[in-house]
């Protein structure tokens, strides 16, 4: 029996059949379909999730974070990975650089240069306003 007190031959998506009670019970918040043990069997791409075979759970797609609700939320612009705490970036997509404000920027400010390999803004030598990747002052 589902939450609408009607009987069905199978439970709807996001619920599983509890054969002991004859009722449909909710899957974990991240699962589209699940087993009675609470393991995800499938995920919904419209929830911005993908299946992780190691944990048997639906995890956030790249550039999204899991805010512990059904639908994952988009990271700030330029983030490859971000946390749910204040949407801070921990790594950037190509063409963006992580700065000390924990956000990704398309260019680095004065006194920093963009390290394209590490995708971070690194400080120039103390007497440089602008520098290049080999720490040579350009201005």
Image (tube, helix red, strand yellow):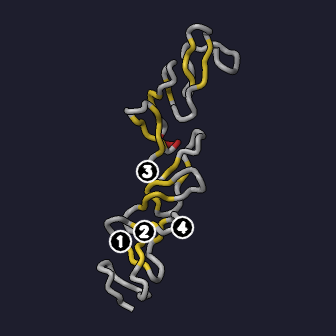
Q: How many marks?
A: 4
The x, y position of residue 97, in whole percent, is 42, 68
Indicate which disc, 1 or 2, sits on the residue closer to the N terminus: 2
Indicate which disc, 4 or 1, sits on the residue closer to the N terminus: 4
Between 45 and 25, the one lying in front of the other is 25
Tag 1, which secondary structure?
strand
2 and 3 marks in contact (CB < 8 Å): no
Tag 4, which secondary structure?
loop
Front disc: 2 or 4: 4
Q: Please, is residue 22 above or below residue 98 in the view?
A: above
Between 134 and 98, the one lying in front of the other is 134
Q: Which residue is mark 1?
A: 115
The x, y position of residue 28, in whole percent, is 56, 29
Residue 101: image tag = 4
2 and 4 marks in contact (CB < 8 Å): no
Q: What is the CA distance from the residue labelled 4 to the residue labelled 1?
A: 16 Å
Q: Which residue is mark 2?
A: 97
Tag 2, which secondary structure?
strand
Q: Residue furthest bottom?
A: 139
Q: Which residue is mark 3?
A: 62
Q: Sort mark 1 into few (<14), some (14-19) or many (20+) by Cα contacts within 10 Å.
A: some
Indicate which disc, 2 or 3, sits on the residue closer to the N terminus: 3
């Amino acid at each position: 029996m589902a939450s609408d007190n009607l009987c069905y031959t199978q439970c709807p998506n996001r619920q599983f059949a509890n054969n002991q009670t004859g009722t449909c019970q909710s899957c974990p918040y991240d699962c589209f379909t699940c087993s009675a043990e609470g393991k995800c069997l499938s995920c919904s791409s419209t929830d911005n999730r993908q299946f992780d075979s190691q944990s048997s759970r639906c995890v956030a797609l790249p550039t999204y974070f899991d805010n512990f609700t059904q639908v994952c939320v988009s990271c700030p612009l330029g983030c490859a990975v971000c946390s749910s705490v204040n949407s801070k970036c921990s790594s950037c997509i190509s063409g963006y650089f992580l700065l000390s404000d924990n956000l990704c920027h398309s260019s680095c400010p004065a006194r920093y240069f963009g390290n394209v390999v590490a995708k971070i803004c690194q400080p120039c030598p103390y007497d440089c306003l602008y520098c290049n990747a080999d720490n040579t002052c350009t201005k």
